[in-house]
Image (spheres, rainbow, N blue to C red):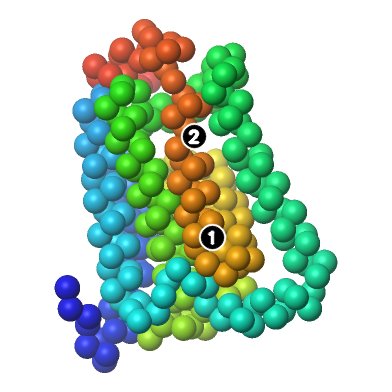
Amino acid sequence: MAKPPMQLLPVAQDLFTAFLVLLTPLISMRRTQQLRRCTSGEARITSYQFTIWKLWVSAAVAVLLAYPTNLNVLPDQEHVATWLGAHLPVFLVAAVATTSFVIIGLRQGFRAMADAAWRKKVAKAVQTMRFMLPVSAKERRYWIMLSLSAGICEELLYRGFLMHYLSGLLAGGVALGVLGAWPVASTLFGLAHVYQGVAGVIRATIAGLLLGLIAILTGQLILPILLHALFDLQMLWMYRPVDDDPDIAEKLIQGCTPSEL
């Protein structure tokens, strides 16, 4: 795929951002509504396959449009590092906040590994979302691929491309600076999860803020990518209906209307 001519690059970046911000949530909403009406193992796998494809194509386009900018490295990192070094209390608060986020986020998953009672509480908490969660062994294998894809591609898109675009460091975009781009990109990341409802948008926005803060503190996306993928992967040991509720699991695999469960 050839890089667009330089005079078209700002327009291409603007159009891609519009697609990411406006169309991506609508596409996700449409596919989610289909699963809400009738879910099954095969329907969920089809949804996972489409999402994986969409994520990788979108990430590839973002990398192409940003080239030669390295989306893995946060924009204006030297200035941010200097500022944080001169404001040690801010750095310490940010470090404590992100460390607490990681510990709290992973603690539930590790606890669920050996605690069936805790998993039942988790299953009850995600009851409204189980129409889209993996049940069978085949679905769970696809969930691994989906989690890894989301970790890599969503970080490149929202903490990579959008942070650079909103910081004013690409041919298109606006010049909000890193600290201005951070909350805006995080909010857009949250809105991309509108298919999960209001609570899902709030959770994703908070996660986006903290993953963005980790990216700012470390200067690159490697740690946010790893954590993002791990947070998604832990659903596999937090939600195990085949072991904990086999009757419901069978209905979810064979096909049912979620409201009937």
Work out which residue is located at the far right of the displayed protein and give it. Answer: 89
Judge whether residue 194 can be spotted in this image.
Answer: no
Q: Is residue 168 left or right of residue 29?
A: right
Q: Position of residue 44 (x, y in %)?
A: 28, 32
Q: Residue furthest bottom?
A: 7
Q: Which mark is residue 186?
A: 1
Crowding near the residue tagged with mark 1, few <14, some 14–19, many ≥20 C-alpha atoms within 10 Å? many
Q: CA distance from mark 1 to mark 2?
A: 22 Å
The image quadrant of residue 47 is: top left
Query: The residue tagged with tag 2: helix, strand or loop?
Result: loop
Looking at the rendered structure, the secondary structure element under dot 1 is helix
Q: x%, y% of residue 30?
A: 29, 44
Identify which residue, 199 or 248, lies in the foreground: 248
Q: Nearer the viewer, residue 14 or 179?
A: 179
Q: Is residue 116 left or right of residue 68?
A: right
Q: Amino acid at mark 1?
A: Ser
Residue 94 horizontal/vertical position (percent): 72, 60
Q: Residue at x 26, y 91 (%)?
A: 7
Q: Position of residue 126 (x, y in %)?
A: 50, 28
Q: Nearer the viewer, mark 1 or mark 2?
A: 2
Q: Is residue 40 above or below residue 100?
A: above
Quarter of the image where one finds residue 56: bottom left
Quarter of the picture holding the C terminus: top left
Q: State the residue at coordinates (56%, 31%).
A: 109
Q: Residue at image x 80%, y 70%?
A: 88
| Relative height, residue 84 to residue 155 (above, below) | below
Q: Is residue 177 above or below residue 24?
A: below
| Rendered image: mark on residue 160 | none
Q: Amino acid at mark 2?
A: Gln
Q: Is residue 223 visible?
A: yes
Would residue 151 appear left or right of 252 to someone viewing this image?
right
- Residue 234 is tagged as 2
